[in-house]
Image: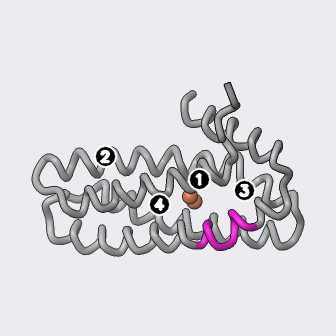
Amino acid sequence: MPAADNDVTTVVLEQHKQVVKQLDAVRIATGSARADEFDSLAAMLDVHETAEETVIYPALRKLGDEGTRVADNRTHEEDAAKEILTKLKGLDTGSQDFEVLFGEFSSKVHAHAASEESEVIPLLTSSVFPEERQAMGDAFLASQHS
Ligand SMILES: [Fe+2]
Ligand SMILES: [Fe+2]
């Protein structure tokens, strides 16, 4: 049986698709379903961003100045999004405040994922050997299931 395609770039892109679906699910849900969808999104983002911080950004920084710049920029975006997420967790998901702040949060998460796809993924593809990307993908998934 061939090994699973756990290239870290594939894993990240798949999870971004999942994040986009879950952002939409929160947006369209109402009542207690929206609270459940939001909890699920928050948990998903937590394990996704933590795995990136653990596995991907350290590898980017090892690539030199460009990798460090890209990792720093992405980390700042994640920190800004986490701040909003913390505020959202303190709001009633049925409130107007939540509605407005969730819209801002959703835009930031989309923009962050787009930056990763336009800067992080190409850098990993051009500068990291496929076997290493596979090992990174295994580590990425293992870190999420521990
Ligand atoms: Fe990220
Ligand atoms: Fe990401």
| Residue position for label 3 | 57
Seen in the image, is 131 located left or right of residue 82?
right
Whichever of callouts 4 and 2 sits on the residue coming sooner in the sequence is 2
In the image, residue 120 lies in the stretch drawn in magenta: yes
Q: Amino acid at mark 4?
A: Lys
Q: Which residue is mark 1?
A: 12
SS state under label 4: helix
Identify the residue at horizontal 73%, vertical 70% (top origin): 70
Mark 4, Cα crowd under 10 Å, few <14 / some 14-19 / many 20+, is some
Query: Which quadrant of the figure contains the N terminus?
Result: top right
- Does the segment drawn in magenta span residue 8? no
Q: Which residue is mark 2?
A: 39
CB of residue at label 4: within 8 Å of ligand 1? no
* Mark seen at residue 97: none
The region drawn magenta spans 115-122
Q: Where is residue 117? Give x, y as percent.
A: 61, 67
Residue 101 image-quadrant placement: bottom left
Residue 82: assigned label: 4
